[in-house]
Each structure stands twice: as structure tokens, then as C-alpha cells.
Amino acid sequence: MKKNLFLVLIGLTLSAESFSQTSWKVLPNSPSNIRRHDDVFFVDASTGWIVNGQGNIFKTTDGGENWSLQFSTDAYLRSVGFLDAQRGWVGTLNRDHILYTTSDGGLTWTEVTNIPAPKPLGICGISAVDDSVVYASGRYNSPARVIKTTDSGASWTSISMDQYANGLVDCYFLRADSGFVVGWKGDTYTTGIPVILFTVDGGKTWLRRYTGKEEAEICWKISFPSPQVGYVSLEIFHDGPTFFLDTSDGGVTWREKRFADNRADVQGIGFLNETTGWIGGWGLSAFETSNSGQSWHSAGFGMNINRFRFLSDTLGYAVGQRVYKYSKEAPSAVESPDQTSAPSDFRLEQNHPNPFNPETTIRYSIGRTGPVSLQVFNLSGQLIATLVEEVKSTGEYEVKFDASNLPSGIYFYRLLANQKFLSRKMVLAK
């Protein structure tokens, strides 16, 4: 998505592949992706698949130690789900080729062509319920559709969700007839309000369990670590603060909880149990909570994470720029102070003048003494200049940026301090 481009680019310089003293580790032989892998699904501790926007499907049969490329296409692959080690589906963001399936563990993949109208224009979430029932939802930027099969894909039903939502992202079904879909309602996905919908009759009717009050927010991913406790991430398109949602009554009611005071482009969310979980997203390394999201601290791994999946309370996987594995036998995470909520005086102001030629001033302030980095990137994600790289005391600062040797265009500058970041766009017009 174009609106996320700057967060992707600035994230490229953050190292998230080397970490210790954590229950998560990067799988060293997993494929690297400059943007991210979008989804992951394991049918057991050994066998799993990942998919990404470059149209690649990778498979592992040894718990992620090694990966093989199974399939490649021009379509953006967004979601993956399997009923068992042989039967699975991959959803795309390509309106002409929205779903692929395999019946031999991924040795061959074929396009699903028997989805009736109203046909989705993309599949962002897949929920495999039992040995024959699968639901899928999409698309994130409209239209809102749910498709389901009750015969392992031999036939499909397509459900228009237009009266409830304008776009859908993720889905989670507890049983063959009961489950949730999440997305947004409004004119566009960047200005809509978040919604959570629930059905008890296989999608014939839907109840709106949550409707947000803030515009420019959408529900992105859903995680239920227990039948009663669930969490939903909120992607925001305004300046902040950033929230997520939780429920303690099986999804009947949902509460907003603050993740950060500033804007964080949150997408992936996953909970190991009712209290311990992680959040990731574009331009973010993962953050962890051990108290149901009352506070968060840096988890020390992962960049651009879009999906967490747990097979048990001792094993899980996540995908972003790499593939990450959770193991309870690994060293425990080291607790650190809550570092997510930026102090009110952690600010990065718009450069002035903007557009500029060839010099501009960038002002910023920090609320706690520590290492500070202020860097400039181009649209290709290349580091153009490091304006600040030193320990700074609490206070307000300004720095000049001279672009005399650069071509006209859009550039991004990022402030990183105390494991938090802020970024803005500027335009050089010669």
C-alpha cells in the first residue's frame, strides 16, 4: 500500500535480525524480504508455508530450519491457510486471480475458478475451521466479501457484506457456523471507522460487535488466545495515539487500549495466552506485553511483522522481513521499562520550508537523555544522510539539511530515540 511506503523504507535501516535473551529467534535460513512476508501457516511443528507480495510460496518440513520455493506468480499473495498437510489455499490481492489451492502439500498450485458472484477482489484472511470448512475475507480496500466452503473447496459460497462493512481484512472462526471478520466502514479505507462483525449461522446474518468512534482507522488482525479473550490490531491513518482492541467475554464487547501516544503503523498482533502477546507493523520492530496490553516494551526482534501464529503455548511463528520462531525453551525475555508511549515532548516537526531548495531546517525534541538518530532516505529506501547520531540530553533541537547535491523529489526523514521513531515527508523542488 502506497501510504505505508515511507514506513517500509525507514524500517530498512533498523536491525531486527540479531537479538538474544528472547523467546523469539530469527530462522537463519528463512528467505529475506525487503518489504515483508505477509502470512504464515503451520499444520504441525514441522510443516508450514509462508507467502509474500512478490508472489512467492515457500514451504518448510523441518520447523523452519530450511525453506524451498514451491510456487511463484505475478499476483500479490496476502494470506494462507491449510486444512491438513495436503489441502490448502493462498489468497491474493489480484482481482483477476484471487485464490489458489493445492491438494498435494504445495507440489502443485491451481487457481480457484468456481467462486460465484458477488466475487471478492482479493482475499486478506483465511480461517480453516475443520476438515472441510474454510472461510476467507477481503478485500482490505473494498469490496467487503466473505467466501466459504463446507466441502473442502469443491464448491464455494460468496457473501456480500456491503450493508455491514466496506472493506474486510482478517477473519477468525471458532466453529463451522460461528466466527468474526474485521475491517472498516466508510467511504475509503484511509478515512473509515473500524468494525468487528460476528455470525452464529455461517454468515447468513451478522452482528456488529464493535464500531469505532475515530475515523481513519481500520481493524487489521485478530487473535484469540482463549475462547473468552481476544485482541484486534488497529491500523491508523491519523497522527495518533495508537490503540488496539481487546475482549474478555468472547467478543461480545470490545475495549480500546492504548498502545502508543504517537502514530505507529500497527498490523500484526498475536497472543500466546490471555496476557502475553506481541504487536508489529510497518517500520516497527516487535513490542511485547505480559499484562494484557496494559504496558508494552521492545521485544528485540522482527521488522514489518504482519502475522503471528501460535501452534501451542510453547511454539509459534511470525513473519515480517524474515521468519521468526517462538520457543518456550529459549531464554526468557528480559523485562524493560515501558518504552512504547512517547513522552509529549518527543516530537518531530515538519521541515521548513517545504518544499525547499536546496536547504531546509528540521526541528525535533526528546523527552529523555539517550542515543538519537536523525536520518534522511530517498524513495528507494537508500540512506541519503545522517544528520544526527549521538547521545542527546532532554531538550529541543534543530538541524540544517543541505540537498545541493541531490535531485528533485520526495525524501523522508526519521527520528529514532529511546526505541521510538517518528518520520515525515519532505519535497525537494529545484
Image (tube, rainbow, N blue to C red):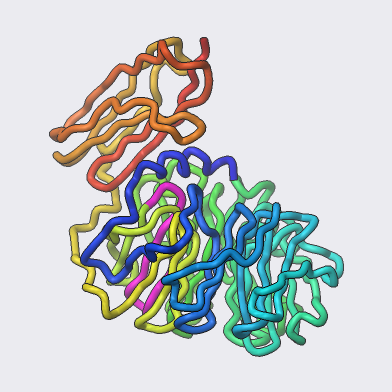
Q: Which residues are magenta?
A: 268-284
Looking at this view, is 179 or 279 the one in front? 279
Looking at this view, is 44 or 337 the one in front? 44
Q: Is residue 246 visible?
A: no
- Image spot of residue 394 (x, y percent): 15, 35
Q: Tell me if 213 is positioned left or right of 291 in this view.
A: right
Residue 380 against residue 336 in the figure, above or below: above
- Image spot of residue 56 (x, y percent): 61, 59
| Residue at 81% across, 63% down | 119
Residue 229, located in which quarter of the rendered image?
A: bottom left
Q: Is residue 384 visible?
A: yes
- Image spot of residue 133 (x, y percent): 69, 84
Q: Tell me if 220 is positioned left or right of 384 in this view.
A: right
Q: Is residue 274 magenta?
A: yes
| Residue at 61% across, 85% down | 84
Residue 52, located in which quarter of the rendered image?
A: bottom right
Q: Of all residues shown, which one is farthest toward the bottom? A: 131
| Residue at 36% across, 34% down | 414
Q: Is residue 308 magenta?
A: no
